[in-house]
Amino acid sequence: MTNNRKMKVLASVMLCFIIVLVTMLIYAKSIYDKNENPADSTIIPENSSASQSVESTATDTSTQSASSSSEVTETIDLKLYYFDADDYDNVKEIRTVTIDKKLYQDDITAAINKVLSSTGLNINKAVIKGNSVTIDLPREVALKFNMGSSGGVTYTNILAMTILNLPNIEKMEVTVDGVAGILADHFSFNGTFTKSEDGKKYTFTESDNESKGLY
């Protein structure tokens, strides 16, 4: 083999060796880069199902919150007419008592007792017929009306003005433990209380029926 031929063969071998070496270096570098950035292979695209799930949950929570805030309890403002013995002919204070509208519609007795709760008065039952209401008092409450002349007028004014200023109520009758026509030394329930046209006072019309004493 001539020297020229030997040189050509040696050059070919060297070229192949260089190509193999470069290839191995490129492969090694790609492996190294991959190990340096492992998180790149776990990145979740913005449009992936996981992202959509988070957005869906947020939307559901927002919808539930909006739904809860829309369920607002309806209320009704009732008036408590407060009198005291210093001047029992004139109202001392008109207090607004806010009641659940559903309570007023479903249980008028409980609603009235809530309005009267600060006065020491309470009722057994209220029955509405048209624009008239019958209020039934417990005997122990009726006794308070008979504690002196000023007590009788004061409590009568509180009860009559408060009840007669309920929505759509124009007349009131009062019974005691179911008994009508009760009469005592300092008050009379033997008749009908009627709201005045201006709403500032009431009139009391005696009944022709025989009265009954506070037993």
Image (cartoon, grey):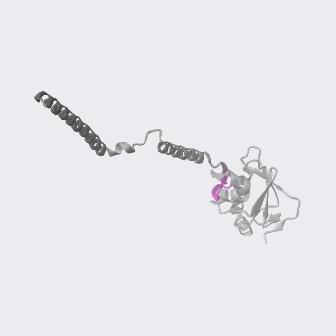
Residue 186 appears left or right of 65:
right
Image quadrant occupied by the C terminus: bottom right
- Of residue 78 and residue 170, the one placed in the foreground of this image is 78
Image quarter of residue 18:
top left
Where residue 14 sits in the image (x, y, percent)?
A: 17, 34
- The answer to whether one can see residue 160 in this image is no
Q: In this view, does 41 lie above or below 187?
A: above
Image quarter of residue 136:
bottom right
Image quadrant occupied by the N terminus: top left
- Of residue 43 and residue 100, the one placed in the foreground of this image is 43
Residue 14 appears left or right of 72:
left
- Of residue 74 and residue 177, the one placed in the foreground of this image is 74
Whether the magenta-drawn stretch holds residue 82 is answered as yes
Residue occupying the point 80% across, 66% down? 178
Where residue 77 sits in the image (x, y, percent)?
A: 66, 49
Q: Which residue in the rendered view is the most extreme toward the front?
A: 1
Q: Is residue 177 above or below residue 109?
A: below
Where residue 161 sits in the image (x, y, percent)?
A: 72, 52
Q: Magenta span covers which residues?
A: 78-91
Residue 45 appears left or right of 192:
left
Residue occupying the point 70% across, 57% down? 112
Residue occupying the point 72% across, 50% down? 166
Residue 105 appears left or right of 39:
right
